[in-house]
C-alpha cells in the first residue's frame, strides 16, 4: 500500500460513506462490478418528481479509493439529477485519463488526485458513479414498463 496513494484523507473518506443501507422500495436499483479489480457497488435510488435523487442507498465492496469515491458521491448525490451525476463522472474520468485539469467541483474530489497515476484504480473510483447511473436507468425502465 503506497502512502502517496492511500492518504489520511482517502482513508477518512473510506470509513465515512453516508447512506450505507439498501432502500426497501427503490425506484431503481443496480449492482455493478469492476472486471479490473473485482470491486462491487450496489445503489438504490428513490427519485423526486423532477427525477433528482431524493433518497440513496449504497453498498460498497471496494478498495479504499473506491470507498472514498463512494463517500464523495453519496455526500453529494441527494438533490442531483442523472445529468449532473453523469457530468461529474465524465469530469472525473477525464481527469483520471489526463484530458481534464481537475477531478471536479464536488467537495473532496481533490483528494482523488493521487490516484491519477494509478490506472489500475480508476475503475474502482468510477464504479460508484456507474452504479448510481445504472440505478437511474433501471428506474426509467421500470417507469416505461408501468
Image (tube, helix red, strand yellow):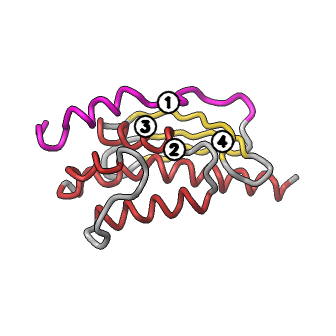
Marks 4 and 2, how far apart in space? Answer: 14 Å
Residue that lies at the very extreme toward the bottom in this rendered image: 99
- Residue 60, compared with residue 29, is above or below; it is above
Mark earlier in primary sequence (2, 1): 1
Nearest the eye: 52 or 96: 52
Q: Which SS class for mark 2?
A: helix
Q: Which residue is mark 4?
A: 45
Secondary structure under badge 1? Answer: loop
Q: Secondary structure at mark 3?
A: helix
The mark closer to the camera, 4 or 2, is: 2
Sequence-earlier tag: 4 or 2 = 4
Quadrant placement of the N terminus: top left
Q: Which residue is mark 3?
A: 71
- Which residue does the numbered mark 1 point to in the structure image? 18
Identify residue for label 2: 76
Instruction: Tell which tag, 3 or 4, sits nearer the viewer.
Output: 3
Label 4's element? strand
Amino acid at each position: 500500500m503506497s502512502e502517496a496513494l492511500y492518504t489520511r484523507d482517502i482513508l477518512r473518506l473510506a470509513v465515512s460513506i453516508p447512506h450505507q443501507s439498501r432502500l426497501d422500495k427503490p425506484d431503481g436499483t443496480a449492482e455493478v462490478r469492476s472486471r479490473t479489480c473485482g470491486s462491487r457497488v450496489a445503489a438504490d435510488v428513490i427519485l423526486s418528481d423532477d427525477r433528482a435523487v431524493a433518497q440513496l442507498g449504497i453498498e460498497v465492496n471496494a478498495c479504499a479509493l473506491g470507498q472514498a469515491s463512494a463517500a464523495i458521491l453519496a455526500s453529494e448525490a441527494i438533490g442531483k439529477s442523472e445529468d449532473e451525476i453523469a457530468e461529474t463522472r465524465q469530469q472525473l474520468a477525464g481527469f483520471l485519463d489526463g484530458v481534464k485539469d481537475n477531478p471536479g467541483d464536488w467537495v473532496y474530489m481533490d483528494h482523488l488526485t493521487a490516484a491519477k497515476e494509478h490506472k489500475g484504480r480508476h475503475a474502482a473510483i468510477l464504479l460508484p458513479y456507474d452504479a448510481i447511473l445504472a440505478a437511474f436507468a433501471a428506474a426509467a425502465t421500470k417507469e416505461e414498463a408501468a
